């Protein structure tokens, strides 16, 4: 006869059972749905965080959800450029990318980072397919156009960012085929243009375009902050595009959060059911957001 459990052990087991019961309606709601996850930030450089992220993605696949991962790699690109003695310049958060920088970016994103993430997922018991926007005609891109006012003349002038692109079309065939075969697509934000050139795309932007094209149930942007905060520093859990426009106008939303939320708004207005900005440094933040009533970040719905 097995030894009886002490009260503390029993309490811990009951807590686990209650967690599963709480998750049940969410498991039923999202079965067969697609989640697009943008993975980046400091979590990418932390082996323990990478292991936990891989476990979470494999768990989502195991319970019938189809995760699609789009990863960044800015710090890793910067480190490689520094090692090679290439200096980086930024405009509005986008790296000015000449031919040499574009080649390094593709090498780091499609090579080292992509395959490392595939390896983490395999280590967690999943099957991942590492690709970029170049594969299977997944994404076509065009050159990003930016302007800025000359400080003296106040005249708008064009800024050449080099080989920085933005998605113009997404063909989801490869993603859907891989997902149906039980694989987890892991996508590097590199894509060709009609001009035959290769473009480096902001990972948030890439993830948003793919989420919209797939009609994903969720777009997750894993960041280094808890979500969108009000002026008192309190997390705002639910926002609409109208709320975001108002908060941007009064200065509550500023800096690097603006392009992230613009990506979320574009995605939900183009077919994604909802987008979430949450802290990728929190262990299992994505699971807390999906499978609990309280959630863990800022949800944006149209």
Image (spheres, helix red, strand yellow):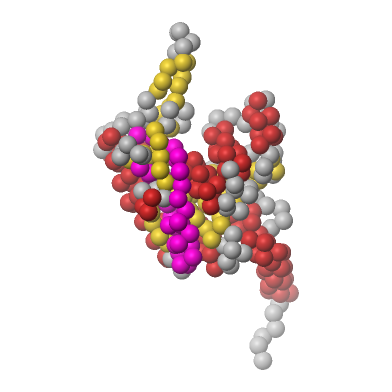
Q: In this view, which residue lies farthest toward the bottom?
A: 1
Q: Quarter-wise, where is residue 129 in the image?
A: bottom left
Q: Quadrant of the N terminus?
A: bottom right
Q: Is residue 118 left or right of residue 286?
A: left
Residue drawn at x 66%, y 36% is 241
Say if the magenta span includes residue 279.
Answer: no
What is the x, y in percent for residue 204?
Answer: 50, 42
Q: Nearer the viewer, residue 36 or 166?
A: 166
What is the x, y in percent for residue 257?
Answer: 57, 35
Res. 203 in view: no
What is the x, y in percent for residue 120?
Answer: 42, 60
Q: Quarter-wise, where is residue 9 in the image?
A: bottom right
Say if the magenta span includes residue 168.
Answer: yes
Q: Nearer the viewer, residue 17 or 108?
A: 108
Q: Quarter-wise, where is residue 263 in the image?
A: top right
Count of numbered badges drawn on the protein: 0
What is the x, y in percent for residue 301?
Answer: 67, 44
Residue drawn at x 59%, y 29% is 254
Q: Nearer the viewer, residue 56 or 2?
A: 56
Residue drawn at x 40%, y 43% is 140
Res. 161 in view: yes
Residue drawn at x 50%, y 48% is 210
Q: Nearer the viewer, residue 256 or 188?
A: 188
Q: In this view, which residue lies farthest toward the top?
A: 153
The stretch of residues the image draws in magenta is 163-192
């Amino acid at each position: 006869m097995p030894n009886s459990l002490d009260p503390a052990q029993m309490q811990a087991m009951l807590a686990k059972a209650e967690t599963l019961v709480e998750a049940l309606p969410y498991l039923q709601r999202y079965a067969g749905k697609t989640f697009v996850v943008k993975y980046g930030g400091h979590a990418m450089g932390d082996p323990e965080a990478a292991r936990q992220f891989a476990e979470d993605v494999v768990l989502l696949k195991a319970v019938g959800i189809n995760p699609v991962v789009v990863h960044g790699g800015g710090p890793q690109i910067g480190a490689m450029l520094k090692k090679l003695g290439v200096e980086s310049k930024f405009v509005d958060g986008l790296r000015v990318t000449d031919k040499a920088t574009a080649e390094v970016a593709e090498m780091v994103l499609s090579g080292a980072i992509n395959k490392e993430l595939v390896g983490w997922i395999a280590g967690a018991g999943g099957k991942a397919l590492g690709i970029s926007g170049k594969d299977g005609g997944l994404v076509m891109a065009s050159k990003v156009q930016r302007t800025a006012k000359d400080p003296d003349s106040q005249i708008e002038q064009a800024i050449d960012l080099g080989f920085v692109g933005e998605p113009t079309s997404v063909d989801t065939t490869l993603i859907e085929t891989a997902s149906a075969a039980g694989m987890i697509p892991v996508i590097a934000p590199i894509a060709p243009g009609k001009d035959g050139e290769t473009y480096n795309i902001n990972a948030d932007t890439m993830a948003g375009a793919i989420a919209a094209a797939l009609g994903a149930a969720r777009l997750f942007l894993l960041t280094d902050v808890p979500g969108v905060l009000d002026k008192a520093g309190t997390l705002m859990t639910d926002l609409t595009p109208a709320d975001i426009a108002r908060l941007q106008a009064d200065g509550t939303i500023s800096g690097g959060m603006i392009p992230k939320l613009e990506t979320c708004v574009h995605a939900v207005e183009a077919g994604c059911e909802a987008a979430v900005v949450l802290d990728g440094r929190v262990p299992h933040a994505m699971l807390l957001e999906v499978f609990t009533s309280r959630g863990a970040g800022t949800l944006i719905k149209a």
